[in-house]
Image (tube, rainbow, N blue to C red):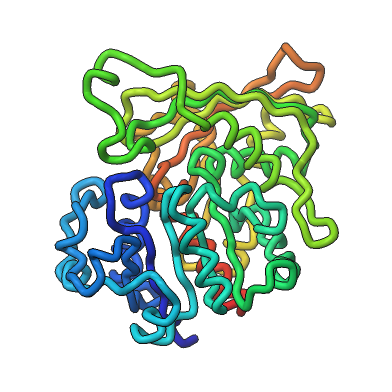
Amino acid sequence: MKKVDVAILGATGTTAFAWVAQQMAEKISDGHPYFNLAALIADDPQHVGKPFSECMEWYGHYTRDLPTALAKMTMVAGNPDALGKAGDVKLVISALPPWSAPDFDPKFAEAGIPVVSESPAFRFEPDVPLVVPEINADHLSILEDQKKKRGWKGYIVSNPVCTVTIIALSMKPIIDAFGMQSCFQVTLQAMSGAGPKGLAAMDMVENMIPFIGKEEEKLENEGPKILGTIKDGEVVSNPMPLSTSCNRVPVLYGHTICIFAETEKPVTVDEAKKVFADFRGPAQELKLPSAPERPIYVLEQEDRPQPRIDRSKGKGMSVCVGRVRKDPAFKNGIKWVVMGDNFVRGTAGNTILNAELLYAKGLL
């Protein structure tokens, strides 16, 4: 299949969103089988016409340096006409913060260029699918309704917050096999989720912070949407009660979540482990390039998963489940710990996986 020209928006600045965009630019420019990085879009007019290296501070992921070819790419203006001069761009991958995305992403969608957006700005729109490819690829069916409703030639597909992607991957097999009546979640989220300059050392050394702004609202709304159904061209969220408490902990990469679920049908520990281990989705069926062969690794050690040891499972695109056990607080209770790399899987990886899904479905 022929490669598709794509553009990335949002790779400058100092927020976590810019960090995500940089990782996506690096991954695609490194020889992606579906995509060719044709353009880097400037959200600041002062960057237009300048080399990428002069417009940003490179944060990379772990220890990688800024690739030379990426450094030399010239920033193009943030409008469809300018993008048309950069190549036959069929997709914009956007990672703008919520205060900027509404000014940019819809312009490309309106002009007929699909957008996969990492921004929170569109996640709660009922006609915008919020997609984890293993879970709800079928939600792409509302895109035609979205285009008609908004008068766009293109469309927007939204990417969840990193923590929700990790949580939802572990909840889906349990919901499918046993149903779920309610769920409680306690997160232990890595510092990198706040961005490269989001936390001061004095905040985190010998400390944890039992609050992450707007994170609990995101988890309690995004998860049910991903696990919801389609009706009349919109997503109807899963109605189960869900309660979350979010914490920032002194870990660099890897979000860990303790989940306490009340299922509709009785479930044993062994049954839960089996559905976790056997879980596969459309991403695996379509053999998407970034999809892990095993979305969920079940770890038997009593003290796992641990971020430093386990975040690289499935090249970082899998999540790890451990400490599966009965929960005596519920009639049909099961609890587990899930951990995943918040960047490799949670943000940059899932966004690219969504782009690959659109490509494989013939939607670009």
Evaluate whether residue 50 shows in this view. yes
Q: Nearer the viewer, residue 161 or 152?
A: 152
Count of numbered circles in the view? 0
- Residue 56: quadrant of the picture: bottom left
Compared across the picture, whether 84 is left or right of 138 comes to: left
Q: Is residue 104 above or below residue 225?
A: below
Q: Nearer the viewer, residue 82 or 5?
A: 82
Q: Which of 212 and 101 is in front in this view?
A: 101
At a point 56% along the width and 29% down the height, the residue shown is 216
Evaluate whether residue 292 shows in this view. no
At a point 48% along the width and 60% down the height, the residue shown is 103
Position of the C terminus by quadrant: bottom right
Q: Where is residue 271 in the image (x, y as percent from the top left)?
A: 71, 34
Q: Nearer the viewer, residue 141 or 89?
A: 89
Q: Where is residue 246 in the image (x, y as percent from the top left)?
A: 51, 24
At a point 49% along the width and 86% down the height, the residue shown is 1
Q: Where is residue 105 in the image (x, y as percent from the top left)?
A: 50, 63
Q: In this view, does 42 lie above or below 200?
A: below
Q: Is residue 307 above or below residue 71?
A: above
Q: Where is residue 3 in the image (x, y as percent from the top left)?
A: 43, 83
At a point 68% along the width and 34% down the height, the residue shown is 272
